[in-house]
Each structure stands twice: as structure tokens, then as C-alpha cells.
Image: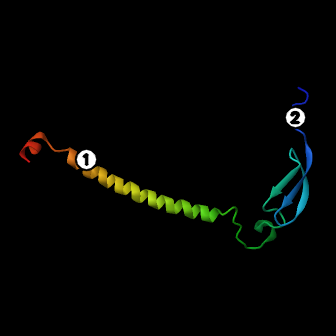
Amino acid sequence: MKAKIHPQYYQAEVSCACGNTFKVGSTKQKIFVETCYKCHPLFTGEERFVDTKGQVEKFMAKQTFAKAYLAKRKEQSKKASDKKAYQQKTLKDLLSA
């Protein structure tokens, strides 16, 4: 087995957004988390909404972008079909016009 290939192992201090701190073993010295066992709804039994970094707003922004994109694609396909109908004239039609 090779020497000195393993990462340094620390007694890491985990700090939660609620203010709780506890120690675990890790390759990092400090770890910051948003929810822990003292404030997570699963462990506390409370019913509350945990929004991580505006995920709801991010999802709503994606939805509005998708609607605008689909409307644009529909308009482009309509223009393409109009253009396609124009291109399908025969030589006889062009000469008679």
C-alpha cells in the first residue's frame, strides 16, 4: 500500500443555519448545512415549508421561459409552413401568374 495517499481526516464541526453544532468525522474541518436533525421537518414533526435557495421561484421562472419559448416555436413553425407553401409552386404556376 502506498504511503501518504489518503486525505487528512478531521474531527469536523458541523454548523446548521438554526444555530445547532455537532461534530463528525470528515476530510473538511468545518461544514455548514441549512437543515439538521434539530430543525428538519422530518425529525421535528412540524409541518413547515423548507425552500432551499428559492427553488420555487427558480421553477416558476423556468415555467414562464418555457411558455414563451413554445409560443415562439409555434410562430416560427407557422412562418415555416407559409414559406413552404410558397416554395411548392410549379413552373407552370409561376409562368401563368
Q: Quadrant of residue 75?
A: bottom left
The answer to whether residue 42 is left or right of residue 58 is right
Secondary structure at badge 1 equals helix
**Colouring chosen for the image of the structure:** rainbow
Between disc 1 and disc 2, the foreground one is: 1
* Badge 2 element: loop
Residue at the spot of label 1: 84
Residue contact at pointers 1 and 2, CB within 8 angstroms: no
24 relative position to 35: left or right: right
Indicate the position of residue 44 as horizontal and vertical percent values. 81, 70
Give coordinates of residue 9: x percent, y percent. Answer: 91, 42
For the point 11% across and 44% down, the residue is 94
Query: Closest to the observer: 68 or 47?
Result: 68
Q: Residue furthest top?
A: 1
Classify 10 Å Cα crowding around label 1: few (below 14), some (14-19), many (20 and above).
few
Residue at x-position 12% and y-position 40%:
91
Q: Nearer the viewer, residue 71 or 3?
A: 71
Q: Is residue 21 above or below residue 77?
A: below
Left or right: 84, with 96 as reference point: right
Image quarter where the N terminus lies is top right
Q: Amino acid at mark 1?
A: Lys
Please give the label number shown on residue 6.
2
Cα distance, mark 1 to mark 2?
Answer: 65 Å
